[in-house]
């Protein structure tokens, strides 16, 4: 199993944006130096704290500042974008990075985001996968010039519902989720469609924060996670959408691993590796990634978390 980083570039204070973006790039550079396998960039629009709206644009900057780390989107909202335009953007990042892009695609669940970007129709499973098909077709088309380095470009699908999970498996695509509860249905559909089961693969975020002094940092980290959860809930409520995260304070338990924002583990690398081993051994999840910049968490604590995650923790889970 591999350890990666995850960023959304939120800034509740709303000041010092150039400095925050530079700090994010330095964090990724340090993660690469300490052994991170990947960095994943997420997307939302219209959040008051400046949630990253254009992950592929930022991915191009990451490509220019790194040499080995893979660069993923988790996820680009494919139903809000023109397929050819998205394929061209992805191609440019793949070229700049020398073939290091993982293109994660999601549907988007907020109606006000769709209105903002001129795509007011709510996506269904069918229209979501039609959009994915359009992007993959564009990537394989001679109309896209130049061509990406990777052929085919790795496509990951971010979905949680049973219909979407099965559709991902039927199409032989990678599932952008670290939730083992989705594993069996995904693999059954993958095999039933005639795909080689060895190619089935899952990856996704987990809510693990590492420290050599978990008790000392817990109040700070819990405050940050509660802020994240509350902003998701508030935004979903204002948009008239179902919140993708549960109501309630952070709960430190292993059962939340890979389930969106439903669990928070604050632990030493050894403790976290034991939980991850117990939870993921023998499964399809090949990579997990963690938040690498958190609101209200001091830079020194974040830097220590990233170093522990990429080095000590990464080595401890490498054989899972």
Image (tube, helix red, strand yellow):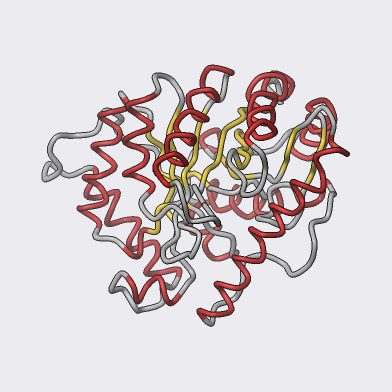
Task: Indicate left or right for 77 with 12 as reference.
Answer: left
Residue closest to the eye, 302 or 181: 302
Outermost right residue: 215
Regarding residue 173, the answer to whether it shows in the image is no
Residue in the image at 73% along x and 39% along y: 209
Residue in the image at 77% along x and 51% along y: 222
Where 157 falls versus 277 (above or below)?
A: below
Where 259 falls versus 307 (above or below)?
A: below
Quarter where residue 151 is shown = top left
Residue closest to the eye, 45 or 118: 45
Residue in the image at 59% along x and 76% along y: 242
Q: Quadrant of the N terminus?
A: top right
Residue closest to the eye, 124 or 90: 90
Q: Number of marks in the image?
A: 0
Q: Position of residue 245 (x, y in %)?
A: 67, 65
Q: Position of residue 69 (x, y in %)?
A: 46, 25
Outermost front residue: 15
Regarding residue 307, the answer to whether it shows in the image is yes
Where 186 falls versus 276 (above or below)?
A: below
Outermost bottom residue: 240
Residue in the image at 60% along x and 65% along y: 231
Task: Indicate left or right for 288 with 181 as reference.
Answer: left
Quarter where residue 290 is shown = top right
Q: Quadrant of the C terminus?
A: top right
Task: Indicate left or right for 1 with 22 as reference.
Answer: right
Where 66 falls versus 46 (above or below)?
A: above
Q: Position of residue 227 (x, y in %)?
A: 67, 59
Task: Indicate left or right for 150 with 183 as reference.
Answer: left
Q: Position of residue 160 (x, y in %)?
A: 59, 60
């Amino acid at each position: 199993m591999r350890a990666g980083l995850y960023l959304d570039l939120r800034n509740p204070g709303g000041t010092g944006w150039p400095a925050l973006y530079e700090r994010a790039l330095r964090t990724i550079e340090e993660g690469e130096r300490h052994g991170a396998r990947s960095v994943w960039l997420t997307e939302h629009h219209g959040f008051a704290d400046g949630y990253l709206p254009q992950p592929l644009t930022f991915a191009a900057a990451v490509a220019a500042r790194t040499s080995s780390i893979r660069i993923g989107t988790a996820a680009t909202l494919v139903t809000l974008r023109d397929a050819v335009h998205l394929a061209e953007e992805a191609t440019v990042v793949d070229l700049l990075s020398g073939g290091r892009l993982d293109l994660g695609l999601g549907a988007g669940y907020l109606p006000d985001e769709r209105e903002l970007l001129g795509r007011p129709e709510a996506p269904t499973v069918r229209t979501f996968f039609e959009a994915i098909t359009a992007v993959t077709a564009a990537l394989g088309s001679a109309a896209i010039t130049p061509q990406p380095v990777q052929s085919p470009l790795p496509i990951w699908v971010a979905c949680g519902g049973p219909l979407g999970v099965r559709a991902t498996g039927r199409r032989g695509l990678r599932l952008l989720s670290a939730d083992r509860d989705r594993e069996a249905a995904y693999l059954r559909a993958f095999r039933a469609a005639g795909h080689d089961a060895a190619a089935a693969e899952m990856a996704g975020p987990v809510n693990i924060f590492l420290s050599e002094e978990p008790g000392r940092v817990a109040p700070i980290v819990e405050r940050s996670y509660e802020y994240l959860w509350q902003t998701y809930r508030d935004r979903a409520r204002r948009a008239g959408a179902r919140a993708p995260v549960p109501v309630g304070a952070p709960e430190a338990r292993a059962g939340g691993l890979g389930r969106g924002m439903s669990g928070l583990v604050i632990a030493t690398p050894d403790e976290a590796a034991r939980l991850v081993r117990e939870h993921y051994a023998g499964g399809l999840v090949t990579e997990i990634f963690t938040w690498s910049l958190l609101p209200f968490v001091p830079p020194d604590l974040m830097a220590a978390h990233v170093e522990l995650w990429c080095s000590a923790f990464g080595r401890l889970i490498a054989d899972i």
